[in-house]
Amino acid sequence: MIQIDFDKMGGLIPAIIQDHENGEVLMVAFMDKKTLDLTLKDGKTWFFSRTRNKYWMKGEESGNTQEVVEVLTDCDADSVVIKVKQNGPAACHTGNRSCFYVRWEDGGWVEHSNPLFNPDDVYKKG
């Protein structure tokens, strides 16, 4: 049986989150063994925040949770793709559907932002 290789990147693996219906990449986050196990058991996406050094479930503050439809690993078993049903309008904390709304154009990065909610109305301060 294949085992996920958490050792290559110091205990973490990248998790690419895709909309299960259209394949759109919604976000990329990091998982350790505990959060991958939680995700597989719970059916919701759980991650490890390198910035905050803590575990978090997608949507725990915003309500924009993700239901796991399918989980795949790559040929090296050191990353995962998780296909989800996105509950709520947006996966990104900026209010955008996807975290990938900045595009390379004419020699620079251009923001194509179309927020579906105001983050200030959703997330707690402090």
Image (cartoon, rainbow, N blue to C red):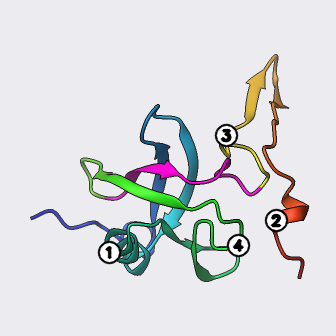
User: Which labelled disc corresponds to residue 41?
Assistant: 1
Cα distance in 3D space between marks 1 and 2: 27 Å
Is label 4 in a helix, a strand or a loop?
loop
Q: What residue does disc 2 label?
A: 122
Q: Quadrant of the N terminus?
A: bottom left
Amino acid type for the residue under numbered disc 4 = Glu
Q: Is residue 38 above or below residue 16?
A: below
Q: Using residue 64 as the reference point, say whether residue 120 is left or right of it.
A: right
Residue 11, picture quadrant: bottom left
Amino acid type for the residue under numbered disc 3 = Phe
Q: What residue does disc 3 label?
A: 100
Is label 3 in a helix, a strand or a loop?
loop
Q: Residue furthest top?
A: 106
Is residue 106 highlighted in magenta? no
Q: What residue does disc 4 label?
A: 61
Q: Is residue 53 above or below residue 90?
A: below
Magenta-drawn segment: 78-93
Q: Quadrant of the C terminus?
A: bottom right
Write the residue at 89% across / 77% down. Answer: 125
**Few, some or many C-alpha atoms within 10 Å of disc 3 (few <14, some 14-19, many ≥20)?**
some
